[in-house]
Amino acid sequence: EDQVTQSPEALRLQEGESSSLNCSYTVSGLRGLFWYRQDPGKGPEFLFTLYSAGEEKEKERLKATLTKKESFLHITAPKPEDSATYLCAVQAMRDDKIIFGKGTRLHILP
Amino acid sequence: NAGVTQTPKFQVLKTGQSMTLQCAQDMNHNSMYWYRQDPGMGLRLIYYSASEGTTDKGEVPNGYNVSRLNKREFSLRLESAAPSQTSVYFCASSERSGREQFFGPGTRLTVL
């Protein structure tokens, strides 16, 4: 059965304190792994897609990496505006279903 | 471009009532999706449509039906609402399978 597990559930950091969020996945044939950001009361907003192990993508203070079993979202020198819930999702090769993890709630303290 | 739009934004129903949630996208996307989001459960796929004319069940399809009316529109119907269907519902679209999804603003539904 396809599964996505995100850790930690919640994370509080001081402004400027770098850290990483984890997304462990089990899927038979990965079509793609996706990272989204969700602010309270809004729909998720796309950040990155990763397709194969070893791939990395960057956007401002965020960097996503992928291995055969997990993905990391690295946050470098975060700012309070980076506070949000970060969601990871996977899509299998065999169908078009997408499975989301439960997310990591990130809070950056000024 | 409006992106993905959803109506209504809020809705309160009584148990047993029916309603349809509307979703439209103006990005000429092929694939469309319906999710529900509950505290502690994350986003769960209800139904999806990989392309116009096709629909498939997701993880939690019971109690729901969908219609891919045309390439732009994908509606979700609750035939007989139950309190367990109280949730926030999100519609999303993607250019095709394997590409990123764009989400609507959500519909907050309460069933009494």
Image (spheres, coloured by chain):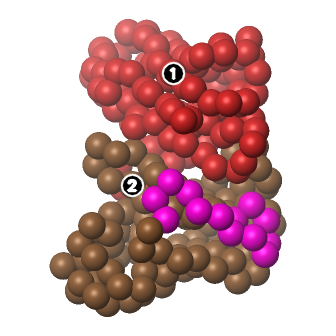
Chain colours: A red, B brown
Q: Give the range drawn in magenta.
A: B49-61
Q: What residue type is labelled 2?
A: Gln
Residue nearest the observer in this picture, A34 or B61: B61
Tell me if residue A108 can be seen: no
Q: What residue type is labelled 1?
A: Ser
Where the N terminus of chain B falls, by quadrant? Answer: bottom right
Instruction: State the image coordinates of residue A60 (x, y, percent, origin top left).
Output: 61, 23
Residue farthest left in this picture = B112
Secondary structure of the residue carrying tag 2 is: strand
Q: Quadrant of residue A108?
A: top left
Q: In the rendered image of this protein, does residue B82 appear above or below residue B103?
A: below
Instruction: State the image coordinates of residue A19 (x, y, percent, origin top left).
Output: 43, 11
Q: Decide whether the magenta segment is chiefly helix, strand or loop.
A: loop
Residue nearest the observer in this picture, B85 or A62: B85
Q: Which residue is drawn at 74% across and 61% down?
A: B50
Instruction: State the image coordinates of residue A33 (x, y, percent, origin top left).
Output: 65, 32
Q: Name the residue under label 2.
A: B37
Q: Mark 1 points at which residue?
A: A24
Disc 1 crowd rating (10 Å Cα; few below 14, some 14-19, many 20+) is some
